[in-house]
Image (cartoon, rainbow, N blue to C red):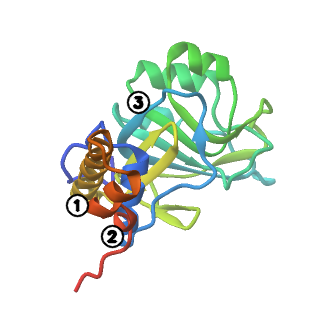
Amino acid sequence: MSGTVTASKPAPHLSTASVSDALDSLGLPGSLHGIGALRQGQRAVGPVFTVTYEPVDEAGGTVGDFLDDVPAGAVILIDNAGRTDCTVWGGIMSRTAHERGIAGTVIHGTCRDVAVATAVGHPIWSVSRFMRTGKDRVRVAAVQTAVTIDGVLIHPGDILVADDDGAVVVPAARWDEVADVARRIDRVEDAIVEAVRGGATLAEARARHGYHSLQTRKDPS
């Protein structure tokens, strides 16, 4: 697969909230606005496998069989320009992806066959759900090329984290750095809760541990 990840293995426990705050503190974009979990309790972490769709024209085209090229552990990221009038993911794909150990699917667009995805346990994040097929409406335009979603430039192999709060992408070369900052944020938030349990007010605990500037971009100088 192109865009091979060289960072350490992604930490499966980090939340999208902590990763998003870490990105903010480093001045990096990454949060994918408008894309939400198909159902609660989902989680996926892994290197991105990108797929781009476009409208069909007189030349035709197909929705594509790219699943044959996706490695186990990857997170599929489909960019259908946010369209909600036709689907680019359905039951056959959910079942196939689950059988092949694909970590999850994130769609800048729409999915269908929700019951099938739920039954097999394949995690999906999307803009919406809608039953109308994408066949004869959209086609695969590119696989494993850079895409831009909500102003976030995403390359194949970047690390995607998705959970109940949505989806966020981290450049592969910055993953270790971002993960370290996210872990520090988690430790601070845990310390605040412990301080409150010990009798401090929330305002005191937050001030003591610098809560209000956790995500503030730091001056590199």
Q: Nearer the viewer, residue 33 or 181?
A: 181
Mark 3 and 2 residues: CB-CB less than 8 Å, in contact? no
- Report the quarter where the C terminus lies: bottom left
Instruction: Say above or below: 70 vs 148.
Output: above
Q: Is residue 117 left or right of residue 204?
A: right
What residue do we see at 79% from left, 54% from top? Answer: 57
Q: CA distance from mark 1 to mark 2?
A: 9 Å
Which residue lies under the disc numbered 3? 102
Disc 3 versus disc 2: distance between alpha carbons?
30 Å
Amino acid found under the numbered disc labelled 2: Leu
Q: Is residue 4 visible?
A: no
Seen as rendered, the residue at the extreme front is 199
What residue type is disc 3 on? Ile
Residue drawn at (47%, 41%) of the image? 76
Question: Label 1 sits on what residue type?
Answer: Glu
- Whether the residues at callouts 1 and 2 have beta carbons within 8 Å, the answer is yes
Q: Secondary structure at mark 2?
A: helix
> Is residue 93 shown above or below 47?
above
Q: Position of residue 107 (x, y in %)?
A: 59, 43
- On residue 177, the disc is 1
Kindly indicate the quadrant of the structure image that contains residue 169.
Answer: bottom left
N-term-proximal mark, 1 vs 2: 2
Query: Where in the figure is residue 172, as x and y percent of width and height?
Result: 30, 57
Residue annotated with mark 2? 26
Front residue of 200/11: it is 200
